[in-house]
Image (tube, rainbow, N blue to C red):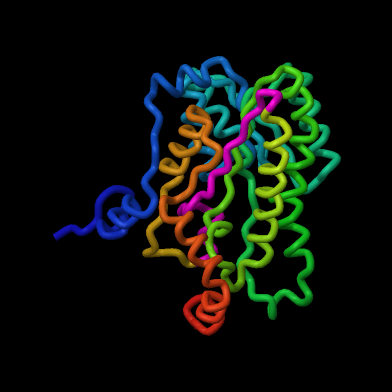
Amino acid sequence: MNDTTGNGRPLAERVATRLLYPTARPRDKALREAVSGRVVLVTGASHGIGKATVRKLAAAGAVVLLVARSREDLDEVAGEITAAGGTAFAYTADLSDMDATDRLGRELLDTHGHIDVVINNAGRSIRRGIDESYDRFHDFTRTIDVNYLGPVRLLLTLLPDMRERRAGHIVNISTWGLRMPPMPRWSAYYASKSAFDVWLRTVATEIAADGVTTTSIYMPLVHTRMSAPTDFSGMPGLTSEEAADTVCHAVVAKPVEISPWWAGPLQAWSDITRGSTHRFISRSRGFHR
């Protein structure tokens, strides 16, 4: 008997994914009404969630601006979109280079006039124990540059125009890890993602009066190239397409945040039982592997 269905994943895993991480997919008409003719910038657009997202947005009529480090991969994605009748522009940039990121923002505004939606998707993930990091300070600078400082530098360039136009939406692809107790081996990644998460939520309170909105997506596990170095095989997780549906829902509905349904209760419970939760995780060998 075949116990797999769709994408080669075991049926039990797919059922668990549906229960733990139900996704909201906007209707085609709603997505088209939200993005048709709008200029949408997506970072990390050459692979994974970003690649699936730009395809969906372009198919709905958006003018998509693709940003990533690899010119060849970007051109391939942009070419596919153009061949399908969409409109896409590729921009090579490394968000860890602050001067280049500032120039990118200015070039985008000069070329396209304005940006309607910014989807901050580019990221760097590192899973490494602290005992393996004593001589690897660059692990922390690399993650902080890509996950925090780069997106801040880009938005500092784009935000003035959004506020002046009194229109704009920013979607941040964060991680469910920020809604959970701290886990061993993720110090560099979680700290950098947390920094931008707090920055954006704080800035959101200042720009709301100018008509600029934000959505923080606390994305669960997504089986992509970025997550592949850590063995998550067999664990419930979204595909890039499913994650992209969530991003599109954020663009259409503009909720303040999107997170797994159980994340809020878990966060509240872990805050109340912080000491015992810390002791449990510290002593459980499974979390340290």
Horizontal side of 66 relative to 251 (left or right) equals right
Q: Position of residue 278 (x, y in %)?
A: 56, 76
Q: Identify the image quadrant of the N terminus.
A: bottom left
Which residue is at a point 73% across and 34% down the rendered structure image?
Answer: 206
Residue 224 among those drawn in magenta: yes
Horizontal side of 112 relative to 251 (left or right) equals right
- Residue extending furthest toward the right: 99
Which residue is at a point 61% across and 72% down the rendered structure image?
Answer: 185
Q: Position of residue 160 (x, y in %)?
A: 79, 26
Quarter assignment of residue 15? bottom left
Between residue 252 and residue 269, name the one nearer to us.
269
What is the tally of numbered marks visible in this picture? 0
Quarter assignment of residue 89? top right
- Residue 38 visible in the picture: yes
Between residue 258 and residue 51, name the one nearer to us.
258
Q: Position of residue 161 (x, y in %)?
A: 76, 22
Quarter assignment of residue 151? top right
- Residue 289 visible in the picture: no
Q: Position of residue 213 (x, y in %)?
A: 62, 30
Horizontal side of 37 relative to 212 (left or right) equals left
Considering only vertical position in the picture, is 228 above or below 130? above
Which residue is at a point 39% across and 34% down the rendered structure image?
Answer: 25
Which residue is at a point 77% across and 48% down the rendered structure image?
Answer: 149
Residue 240 among those drawn in magenta: no
- Residue extending furthest toward the left: 1
Q: Which residues are magenta?
A: 209-230
